[in-house]
Amino acid sequence: MSTIRSKAVYLPSNINYLAQNNGLEGDTTEALEKLMGSSWLVFGVGFYLACPFLVPIDPRCRLVGQKMNPSQTYTPSGAVGIAGPVAAIYPVISPGGYQLFGRTFPAWQTWGKGADFNPERPWLLRPFDQVSFMPITEDHYIEIEQEFNTGQYKFQIEPTVCSMATYTGFVKAIANQVAEFTDKRAEATARVGARENMLLHEWLAQKELEASRLNMESTEVDELSDCTCVSSSMSASVWKIKCQVEQVIKSADEVMIILKAMIPTFHHHQHSQCHPRCQPTRDRGLYRQTSKMSAFALLAAW
C-alpha cells in the first residue's frame, strides 16, 4: 500500500496491523479467521450512498483498529475496512481511512441494475440485515465483478430470525472467552497505540523540518530567472519529486511531482527544465495509489 507516511503501525499491511492491535498470536491468518468467523449485523445505513456499517455478531470476533492518519485519497468501491469496532463497505471510489481487510461488491448500484437493486432503491442492505463473508481468489473476484457491473450478479439472500433471548444466552455462555479476548485486546491496543503516537510525532517533526528547508530554498527558486515555474491550482503536500535538476520534460507521460491532494491533477510544460526546489502549494502532479487486498464474496441474509 502506498501512503504519504513512510512509517505507521498499520503499514505496510492493514491486516497484519489488525492482528497485532488485537493481540492475535496467529497474525494475519487468525485475524482473517475471526473476520470471517462471524456473521455481521448491519446497524446503520447512511453517511453517503447508503454506506452500510456493521459489527460482528460474535463478540469474540470484534477486532478494533484506529483510522489511518492522515486518511487516504483513494479507496476502491467494495473495500471492507474497520475503524474502531465498526466495519464499513465502501459504496464507491472515495477517500477513506478505515483499515482495509478485504474487498467485496458494494451494496450500492447507482443505476439500480441487477436482480437485487432497482432505480427506486439502488442500495442492498438495511438495518438489522446480517452479512457473511466468504473468501474467494482474486481471479474469481475479477470474473464475477464483471457480472456485478453489468447487473447479472445475484446475491445469495435467505430469510433469518434474530432472537434476543437466544443471543443473550449465547453471550452468557461464552462470557469467560469474551473477557479473556477483550483483556488481551486492550493490552495490545495500548501497546500498539503508544508506538503509533511515537511514529506519528516523528513524521510530524520530519514534515516541519522539510517545510522549513523548503521555505529557505524557495528564495533560491524565486531568484532563478531562466526557469519556468510549475504551479498548482490547489493546496497539497508534496509526496515525491520524480524529476532531476536540469532534466528536460518532453512528454505528458513524464510525472514531475506527486502530490497528496483530494482532487489530483497533472500539468507539464513541454521542453521546460525542471528545478525540483519549490514550495508544496506551488507544485502540481499526479497522485495514484494502488493496493492489494484479499477478495471476498458478499453473502447477505435476511
Image (cartoon, rainbow, N blue to C red):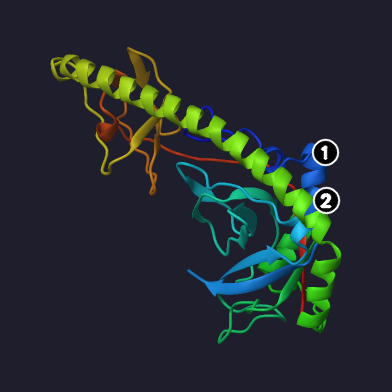
Which residue is labeled 1 in the image?
Answer: 26
**Which percent across, then down, holds residue 111?**
56, 77
Secondary structure category for the residue under label 2 = helix
Q: Which of the 4 quarters of the picture holds residue 293?
A: top right
- Check residue 33 in the rendering and tell me which mark sits there, or answer none: 2
Quick one: 280 or 96, which is closer to the camera?
96
**Which percent across, then down, holds residue 219?**
15, 17
Can see residue 148? yes
User: Quadrant location of the N terminus?
Assistant: top right
271 lies above or below 101:
above
Q: Residues within 10 Å of mark 2 (few under 14, many from 20)?
A: few
**Which percent across, then down, holds residue 114?**
69, 78
Label 1, label 2: how many angstroms apart (C-alpha)? 10 Å
Mark 1–mark 2 contact, CB under 8 Å? Answer: yes
User: Quadrant location of the C terminus?
Assistant: bottom right
- Which amino acid does the dot numbered 2 rest on? Glu
Quick one: 88 or 230, which is closer to the camera?
88
